[in-house]
Amino acid sequence: MAALFVINAAGEKEPFSYKKVYRSARRVGASGQVAQKISDTIAKEAYAGIKTYDLFKRIKELLNKEVPQAALRFSLKEAMRKLGPTGFPFEKYVAEILKSLGYQTKINQYLPGRCLSNYEIDFVAEKDKIVYVGECKYRNILGERVHTPHALANYARFLDILNGKYFKSSHYRGYKIKTMMVTNTKFTTSTMDYAPCVGVDLLGWNYPKNRGLEYIIDREKLYPVTILPALRGYLQNIFIQEKIMLAKDVLKIDSQRFAPKFRIPVSQIESLMEQAKTLLQ
């Protein structure tokens, strides 16, 4: 299989990787035996030029037969892409993740700089005398990445804010002020070279290695509500407006009150709750 090439989300050729298939199945909760069985099937079915999108779709089908909750988790990247088409729901979702990790978080803040009086900041997160001035980079196109100019602009803005009056107040005496960029996709190699060099923290898909966004989500069970297949169409907007951003929050809904309020069939809410239970097992 070493000579077999597939087409990734960016439209580039890359070698087919049995290990990548195996690891992706294991990451979402499949046993070693099931992951190997799925990897063997995919290796037999793969052909030159197959798109990674089609490979992932097939892996999900096989997972659904073996471990339904793993199949739901396998949809995480797609679920984060559904937090759109604007980036605002993604900002809310990131804020929920940070809150679950113990950060006091505010979104859509305006902070003064030294040179410019007003910068719109996606989030400000505070914990243990560390403050993050954060920027979210939401992407809903397959293969799209966060490039170096975004990191350059983020750092320049951060420096101006740091030299402004906001963080010079007595409240922040002894605090460490940092900046962070969070994305639902990947960073380019040059971005990953530049950001750590100047002290910009990055959090994205598989970055930092084995500590990326998807690992935090899996570890803490902070799945976005959009990962549930029954959440379709206008329901997504209702849930986001009601600040129901996480799948686990669906289990707190009183279906007998919620459904009539928004003219949703009770059965649909109950389907969502059943899917959330399966996901969070």
Image (spheres, helix red, strand yellow):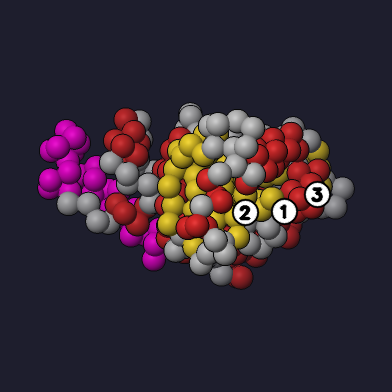
- Is 32 positioned to the left or the right of 74 in the image? right
Front residue of this view, candidates 192 and 270: 192
* Badge 3 amino acid: Asp
Mark in the foreground, 2 or 3 = 2
Q: Name the image quarter holding residue 229.
A: top left
Q: Are marks 2 and 3 in contact (CB under 8 Å)?
A: no
The label shown at residue 10 is: none
Front-most of residues 186 and 44: 186
Q: Amino acid at mark 2?
A: Lys
**Up-down relation of residue 110 to residue 103 (above or below):** above
The answer to whether residue 281 shows anywhere in this view is yes
Crowd band around label 3 with a 10 angstrom C-alpha radius: few (<14), some (14–19), many (20+): few
Query: What mark, if any, has residue 199 been given in the picture?
Result: 1
Q: Which residues are magenta?
A: 255-281
Specify which label sits upstream in the sequence, 1 or 2: 2
According to the image, label 2 marks what residue? 178
Which residue carries the number 3 mark? Answer: 193
Point out residue 241 in the picture as x, y percentages from the top left corner: 31, 37
In the foreground, 111 or 102: 111
Q: Secondary structure at mark 2?
A: strand
> In the image, 5: left or right of 44?
right
Residue at mark 2 to residue at mark 3: CA–CA distance: 18 Å
The answer to if 261 sits in the magenta stretch is: yes
Residue 141 image offset from top left, x and y in percent: 60, 31
Residue beneath the point at 33% across and 60% down: 277
